[in-house]
Image (tube, helix red, strand yellow):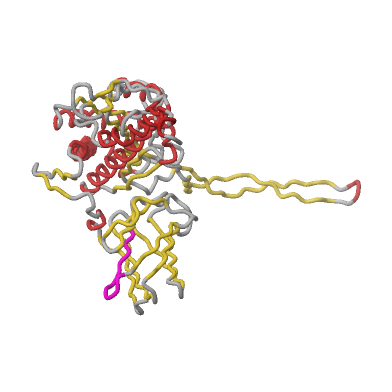
Amino acid sequence: MPWNKVPAFFLFAAFCLLNIHPALSQAPKKLKTIIVDAGHGGSDVGATGQYENSLRSKEKDVTLAISMKLVAQLQKELPDVKTIPTRTTDIFDEVTVKARKANEAGGQLFICIHADSGPLKQGRRQIGTRMVTRYKVTYKGKGRKKKKISTPYEVEEPVYEYFKIPLTRSGTSVWIFAAHKTSEKLKAIMSGGEEFEIEQGGGADSTYNNFDFNTPEGRNVANIYMKRFQERSDRLATLVNEEVESTGRQALGVNQRQKGIWVLQATNMPAILIETGFINNPEDERYLNSEAGQQELAEAITKAVIRYKEQVENPGKLNNVQANGEKKEETLQQAPADKRNLKEIKTIEVKSSKVKVELYDDGEIDNDVVSLYFNNTLLAEKKSLSTRALSFNLDLLPGRTNELLLYADNLGDIPPNTALMVITDGISRYEVRLSADLKNNAMVRFELKNNN
């Protein structure tokens, strides 16, 4: 097509992608507004403590208590950042209203506090006995003269009581909007709410406010925002998970709920949801109801937000803010796998330097998510395992042991994180089953016998 015939909106879209995108990767330059949402409220109680001898906690009360402590801690540690709670009392708002409030407040970060639960199994135990009358039936006579005779007798039978068995699973998990729900996030961006500032360089006239995303070229820009929100949501979620783990509490990783979470999809900003603990686990329920537990969670989340703020305001560097206030800079490529122990190591002798690796979820498909490192270099990040193979072609280095490390990004629905690795070297086929969790990695070592 001749240059002078190219439709104007294609040119504008290309201009957006080439010129606006670098600016978007840095905007907002300063984190100014954080929205903290206490899940449920009012008539929406949420999960409740129902197991035998529970505290009968209501999720709406736990989330409000933790959220108010989080707001106070954020205001203390980040006085220059406006922190806005969606509720401060026991009121109910539809999730659509919460998302609208967050967008209208100009939020740049959305943190939603919840408490987890799960189906409880029913148990029974004998609490005594009782005497009951039963009847022995006999017949007398034959034909029309046959009569039924019922003879009563007493028997002792057990008396049972039924109760709900508490959950054994415990810990804190962090959730982001599912990757396949990005279209919903795109709709939220295009529907407006936040006054986006599209930067196109220096100068007083370089910023467009209230950009129209409902145009073909605007959709390209919205897609950029949507991708950035997903990446930043994941970044904050990872930092929260790390800070929770540093408290000694069980950290269950970063997850993407397959059915989606409305307040995460409909907010025009990076957004995470924190399931602070399992309200039907005795230890977790006591922790969530304690002042110390609530404050510990508030402080851990605040530390993660401070680290996140440092990162988005200083692109290209990851800053760990330590307890003493000092900062330690890391490169973006540092492997988080280095922080965990090696739980199991499998060694395979292969006959070719070119190896194909196929990775599946082992056993029941339960939403396991993993990252892979080959010879200390990130090979694949946060990939979901299923019955469909994740395939990689590896070029082994001669004269050394090559290592493929499996890092669990979550525990899936059924801990631990398990994977089936099928390895072919053009001659032989090998199957290796690996298991990893949030404290331990698994590794396959390749020993090259013939350098082909």
Eyeballing the image, is 399 above or below 304?
below
**Res. 68 visible in picture:** yes
Image quadrant of residue 92? top left
Residue projecting furthest to the bottom = 450
Q: Is residue 347 above or below residue 75?
A: below
Q: Is residue 370 above or below residue 87?
A: below
Identity of the residue drawn at 38% across and 69% down: 354
Residue visible at 29% across and 47% down in the picture: 251
Q: Residue 98's x, y, as percent?
A: 36, 24
Residue drawn at 27 percent across, 40 percent down: 236
Q: Tell me where residue 388 appears, x and y as whole percent.
A: 49, 55
Residue 118 lies, with reference to residue 209, above or below; the image says: below
Q: Is residue 318 left or right of residue 210?
A: left
Question: Please, which residue is most extreme toward the right here?
Answer: 144
Residue 373 coordinates in the image, percent (x, y): 30, 59
Left or right of 195: which side holds 79?
left
Residue extent of the magenta highlight: 397-406
In front of the other: 107 or 129: 107
Q: Looking at the figure, which quarter contains the C terminus? A: bottom left
Q: Is residue 359 magenta?
A: no
Taking the image as drawn, is residue 42 in sight?
no
In magenta segment, residue 402: yes
